[in-house]
Image (spheres, coloured by chain):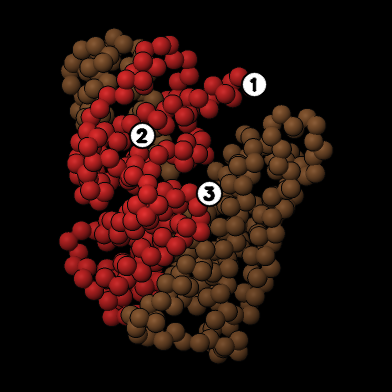
């Protein structure tokens, strides 16, 4: 088998068992062996890409409204008033509203107005420190919050809609992993606007989650 | 899948209740699957607002048809197929060719020629997530669809072939080309970075 033959059979053999002929060629050909190693690495890393992006709450609101208008949802949603009776008191969780606002404010703070190319960096006056230089205080305070406030969000959901608690727990776990990944990217590339955008989106995701939980608590 | 002991409602129970029009059951199903559906849409159209519209449409179609779901396949697979259809229709409306029907196992001579040279930048063990996401964004829609369905979402070639309307051989060929293209993109990005450093 030569390299041309190897390239011809690769599409068929990448996933399944590799023929003895192919294996022999790969052992003796550094270029083809490097190619296969790279393709395997890409396939392996792709499996790690989590589905962490979350649609905004408006998507569910639109779906629900449409389903109701089509008569597919039969049971009307109970309207919960602010002065709900025992077991449905939202007041202990009202402090979560500023937390959600702080998460969004922190995300907006990180979207500093600088939009320079790498070649302009030396000449541009920095208007805000990169996120990782001394760890930006807003990001720090947001990071310091998750375990306690996440638990309190879950407690709020558990009171109002027990069926949803596990779902929110999974969502919080995923969005926290998303934030950690995004921070790592910014740490490695502090002047990379896309990495900062990525981090901002991660914070926005979490703020949306808090917002959804609050909307549920305050209905 | 939602743990029935923790919530009292499994996916199967939520499906049955949704068939009866239970609002909470619809929301449970939506929350169980929204990230996966939305992520697929977002990876294919690279626009958040458009991805949300597509995800909304996919769920609406699902919930309208939920009465016909008999459990022959996994619910998530059924939903994913619907989502792929919604995305494909959108891409076709834009005039974008998703999977060429007559492309079977063509060899990419240009790529082969490049690979005969010395390669100094090995990717194995050093691809980060953001780097790969950006590279996927740059794939043509046909390659991107098959790559996302197979390598990211874990579908088999026979399932992909059924979803996108091509042969199994075509699906394998597209996947291989997608990975080769990603390799080119990742290597050229690294070469650029190395030059700048």
Badge 1 marks a residue whose secondary structure is: loop
Residue A160, x across and y down, in percent: 50, 78
Q: Does A130 appear above or below A29?
A: below
Spot the red chain and give its letter. Answer: B
Residue B181, x across and y down, in percent: 40, 30
Q: Residue furthest right?
A: A125
* Disc nearest the viewer among 1 and 3: 1
Badge 2 marks a residue whose secondary structure is: helix
State the CA–CA distance, disc 2 to disc 3: 25 Å
Badge 3 marks a residue whose secondary structure is: helix
Spot the brown chain and give its letter. Answer: A
Q: Which image quarter holds the C terminus of chain B?
A: top right
**Residue drawn at 51 percent across, 55 percent down:** B48
Q: Which comes sooner in the sequence, label 1 or label 2? A: 2
Q: Residue furthest front?
A: B95
Q: Which residue is mark 3?
A: A178
Q: Which residue is mark 1?
A: B197
Which mark, residue B178? 2
Circle 1 crowding by C-alpha within 10 Å: few under 14, some 14–19, many from 20: few
**Residue drawn at 20 percent across, 58 percent down:** B73
Residue A10, x across and y down, in percent: 25, 25
């Amino acid at each position: 088998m030569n390299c041309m033959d190897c390239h011809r059979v690769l599409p068929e053999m990448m996933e399944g068992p590799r023929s003895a002929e192919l294996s022999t060629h790969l052992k003796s050909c550094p270029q083809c062996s490097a190619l296969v190693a790279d393709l395997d690495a890409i396939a392996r890393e792709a499996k790690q890409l989590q589905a962490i992006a979350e649609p905004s709450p408006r998507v569910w609101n639109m779906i629900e409204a449409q389903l109701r208008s089509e008569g597919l949802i039969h049971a009307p949603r109970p309207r919960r008033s602010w002065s709900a009776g025992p077991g449905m008191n939202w007041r202990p969780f009202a402090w979560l509203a500023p937390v959600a606002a702080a998460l969004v404010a922190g995300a907006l703070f990180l979207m500093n107005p600088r939009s320079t190319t790498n070649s302009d960096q030396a000449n541009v006056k920095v208007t805000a420190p990169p996120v990782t230089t001394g760890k930006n205080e807003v990001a720090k305070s947001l990071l310091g919050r998750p375990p306690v406030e996440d638990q309190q969000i879950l407690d709020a959901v558990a009171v109002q809609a027990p069926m949803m608690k596990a779902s929110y727990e999974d969502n919080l776990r995923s969005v926290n992993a998303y934030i950690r990944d995004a921070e790592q990217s910014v740490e490695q590339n502090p002047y990379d606007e896309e990495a900062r955008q990525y981090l901002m989106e991660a914070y926005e995701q979490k703020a949306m989650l808090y917002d959804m939980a609050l909307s549920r608590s305050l209905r | 899948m939602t743990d029935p002991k923790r919530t009292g409602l499994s996916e199967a129970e939520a499906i049955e209740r949704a068939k009866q029009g239970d609002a909470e059951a619809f929301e449970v199903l939506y929350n169980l699957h929204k990230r996966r559906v939305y992520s697929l849409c977002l990876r294919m159209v690279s626009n958040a607002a458009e991805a949300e519209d597509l995800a909304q449409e996919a769920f609406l179609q699902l919930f309208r048809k939920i009465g016909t779901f008999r459990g022959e396949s996994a619910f998530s697979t059924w939903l994913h197929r619907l989502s792929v259809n919604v995305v494909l229709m959108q891409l076709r409306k834009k005039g974008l060719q998703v999977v060429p029907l007559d492309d079977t196992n063509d060899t990419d001579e240009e790529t082969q020629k490049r690979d005969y040279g010395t390669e100094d930048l090995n990717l194995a063990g050093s691809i980060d997530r953001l780097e790969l996401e950006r590279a996927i964004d740059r794939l043509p829609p046909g390659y991107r669809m098959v790559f996302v369905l197979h390598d990211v979402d874990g579908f088999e070639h026979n399932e992909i072939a059924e979803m996108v309307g091509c042969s199994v051989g075509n699906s394998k060929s597209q996947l291989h080309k997608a990975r080769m293209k990603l390799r080119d993109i990742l290597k050229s990005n690294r070469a650029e970075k190395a030059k700048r450093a």
